[in-house]
């Protein structure tokens, strides 16, 4: 009997105990990941929930009515957030696709410096970037505008998409594109019909995550938007210190795109692609 | 022949090098103008260059002011502690959770899914969740009261707005375990099993298999993600603002409060704190990379 099959026999023997242990471990992990969201969900539909009640004494739809009412500023904030995040993900997607191609496919002089420049914004805090830019943005008339917020959000998102796309491109065989060219396709045609479909899954994931970065961003929006550009996180922040029921409803509204995006991108994320590991080259 | 000649084209063509830089130019323009520009303006403002109030001479007054501020030392220590604790706990728990999840294909798939969902939740939502879960009148306190462990709110340990930043660290760990975990799970999917079985047949115990087979596979991913986690947790603003003490606050909160101070002179101090935050993160990243590169190289 080889050592391998011995190990197999040993593994089979303690299967019931293993199953119990696995079940317990999995349960703990699920609980740890999901538990913090339980009080948020319950608070959003509770009217009175004083200590020490484990379950609210009275439920109410007050906070959801407030959130969805046209008088409240929630719907405009949701739309502002959506506009900013969509614009950021499209612009960062296109610019990152282009820069990622250069970094992933070509070697050139100065490549190390370019890598360093692309990585630096991922390390230097957004607080530093936003505070430094504020005076210049005021002078250029970009402060307190949606355009200004979109511009400053490109700083963390473009490097991210660039890194992901350079990893995707470094696994791409340029010969496919050359073959299309030999067969008479124009450079653009070769790109759109051959290369783009090949790198598309990576691009979708990178752009969706850029969307989420912009969607969640708080401090840059606050500093550059000056409180005039009101996004959902800004609204949530003010309610977090005043009305926990409404804050909880806003929390759930903030998570909504996360769920939608997860469903949209799960097709591309399966198969163990480490798309967020573009940092491995540091 | 027709097809081949079209490769040459009629228009004057750019050299490959020029095309590479053309592809890079939009990204570099944004990084140079908005990122380097922002950092540059931050630095000169920290040197007291404030044209808004007619202040043009460069000096180090803001740094002296920052060091003289009694809040600076405690804030620095708190920020360093929070970032180190959050990064270390996140990395260890993410590796443990991934090693556990990969045992079954259901676990791997469901785990990846849950990780990704968690990853996509904004930090500010996590902060509110921790407030409702961990405060002295939070859900856990109510549960320990229900089973008779804590007679009232004050007998439950104060872990929100406390001096150790427990709730802040908890929020970061809750959010960053999935971030590191997704990368580790992906690295482990790349066929470590064959090597592990080989090591096992050669008599390697669990500890040896982890040290010499699994760790080299996951090290690059853990390394790069933990740098991001450290940089983020060292300088994030909204989580320590909501879950931390007013004094000492983290450096980021201190910087923001100085920046929004009615006294415009405090702005230079805010920028000085910002420069210090950025410098610490950069220096620690370089040191960490040096150390880990040495380790990863000897390992392979």
Image (cartoon, rainbow, N blue to C red):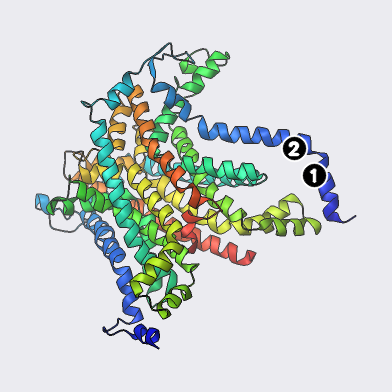
Residues at badges 2 and 1 in contact (C-beta under 8 Å)? yes
The outermost residue toward the top is A57
Question: Which of the labelled discs sits on residue A11, or is there none?
Answer: 1
**Image quadrant where residue A81 sits:** top left
Residue for point 40% across, 22% down: A43
- The picture places residue B152, in percent across and down from the top left corner, at 48, 13
Mark before the other along the chain sequence, 2 or 1: 1
Left or right of A6 in this view: B275: left
Left or right of B93 in this view: A266: left
Q: How crowded is mark 2: few (under 14 residues within 10 Å), some or many (20 or more)?
A: few
- The picture places residue B164, in percent across and down from the top left corner, at 46, 34
Q: Mark 1 lies on which chain?
A: A
Measured Cα–Cα span from mark 2 to mark 1: 9 Å
A200, above or below B6, in the image: above
Front-most of A89 and B205? A89
Question: Could you confirm whether marks 2 and 1 are on the same chain?
Answer: yes
Which residue corresponds to mark 2?
A18
Question: Which of the labelled discs sits on residue B285, or is there none?
Answer: none
Front-most of B126 and B248? B126
Q: Is residue A252 visible?
A: yes
Q: How crowded is mark 1: few (under 14 residues within 10 Å), some or many (20 or more)?
A: few
Residue for point 68% across, 53% down: B210
Q: In which quarter of the image is the C terminus of chain B?
A: bottom right
Q: Mark 2 lies on which chain?
A: A
Q: Is residue B248 visible?
A: no
């Amino acid at each position: 009997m080889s050592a391998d099959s011995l190990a197999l026999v040993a593994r089979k023997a303690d299967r019931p105990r293993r199953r119990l242990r696995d079940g317990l471990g999995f349960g703990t992990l699920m609980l740890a990941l999901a538990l913090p969201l339980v009080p948020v969900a319950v608070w959003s539909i509770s009217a009175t929930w004083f200590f020490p009640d484990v379950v609210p004494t009275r439920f109410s739809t007050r906070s959801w009515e407030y959130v969805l009412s046209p008088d409240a500023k929630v719907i405009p904030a949701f739309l502002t957030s959506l506009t900013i995040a969509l614009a950021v993900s499209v612009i960062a997607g296109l610019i990152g696709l282009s820069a990622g191609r250069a970094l992933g496919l070509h070697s050139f002089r100065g490549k190390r410096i370019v890598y360093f420049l692309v990585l630096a914004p991922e390390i230097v805090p957004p607080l530093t970037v936003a505070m430094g830019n504020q005076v210049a943005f005021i002078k250029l008339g970009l402060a307190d505008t949606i355009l200004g917020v979109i511009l400053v959000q490109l700083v963390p998102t473009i490097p991210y998409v660039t890194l992901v796309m350079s990893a995707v491109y470094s696994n791409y065989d340029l010969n496919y594109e050359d073959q299309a060219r030999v067969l008479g396709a124009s450079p653009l045609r070769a790109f759109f019909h051959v290369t783009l479909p090949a790198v598309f899954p990576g691009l979708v994931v990178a752009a969706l995550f850029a969307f989420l970065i912009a969607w969640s961003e708080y401090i840059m929006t606050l500093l550059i938007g000056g409180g005039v550009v009101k996004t959902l996180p800004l609204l949530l922040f003010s309610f977090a210190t005043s009305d926990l029921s409404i804050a909880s409803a806003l929390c759930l509204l903030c998570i909504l795109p996360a769920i939608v995006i997860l469903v949209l991108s799960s097709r591309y994320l399966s198969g163990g692609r480490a798309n967020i590991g573009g940092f491995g080259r540091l | 022949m027709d097809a081949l000649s079209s490769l040459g084209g009629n228009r004057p063509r750019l050299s490959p090098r020029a095309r590479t830089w053309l592809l890079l130019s939009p990204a570099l323009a944004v990084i140079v103008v908005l990122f380097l520009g922002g950092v540059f303006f931050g630095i000169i403002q920290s040197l007291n260059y404030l044209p808004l109030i007619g202040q043009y001479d460069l000096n180090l007054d803001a740094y002296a002011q920052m060091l003289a501020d009694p809040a600076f030392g405690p804030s620095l220590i708190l920020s360093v502690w929070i970032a180190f604790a959050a990064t270390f706990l996140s990395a260890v728990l993410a590796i443990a959770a991934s090693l556990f999840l990969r045992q079954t294909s259901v676990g791997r798939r469901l785990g990846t899914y849950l990780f990704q969902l968690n990853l996509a939740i904004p930090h500010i939502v996590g902060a509110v969740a921790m407030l409702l879960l961990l405060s002295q009148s939070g859900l856990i306190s109510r549960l320990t009261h229900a089973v008779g462990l804590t007679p009232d709110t004050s007998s439950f340990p104060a872990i929100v707005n406390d001096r150790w930043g427990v709730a802040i660290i908890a929020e970061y760990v809750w959010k960053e375990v999935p971030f590191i975990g997704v990368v580790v799970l992906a690295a482990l999917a790349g066929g470590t099993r064959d090597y592990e079985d080989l090591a096992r047949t050669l008599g390697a115990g669990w500890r040896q298999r982890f040290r010499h087979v699994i760790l080299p596979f996951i090290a690059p991913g853990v390394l790069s993600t933990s740098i991001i986690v450290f940089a983020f947790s060292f300088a994030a603003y909204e989580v320590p603002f909501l879950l931390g003490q007013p004094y000492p606050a983290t450096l980021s909160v201190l910087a923001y409060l100085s920046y929004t101070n009615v006294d415009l002179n405090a702005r230079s101090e805010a920028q000085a704190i910002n420069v210090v935050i950025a410098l610490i993160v950069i220096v620690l990243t370089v040191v960490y990379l040096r150390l880990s590169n040495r380790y990863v190289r000897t390992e392979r």
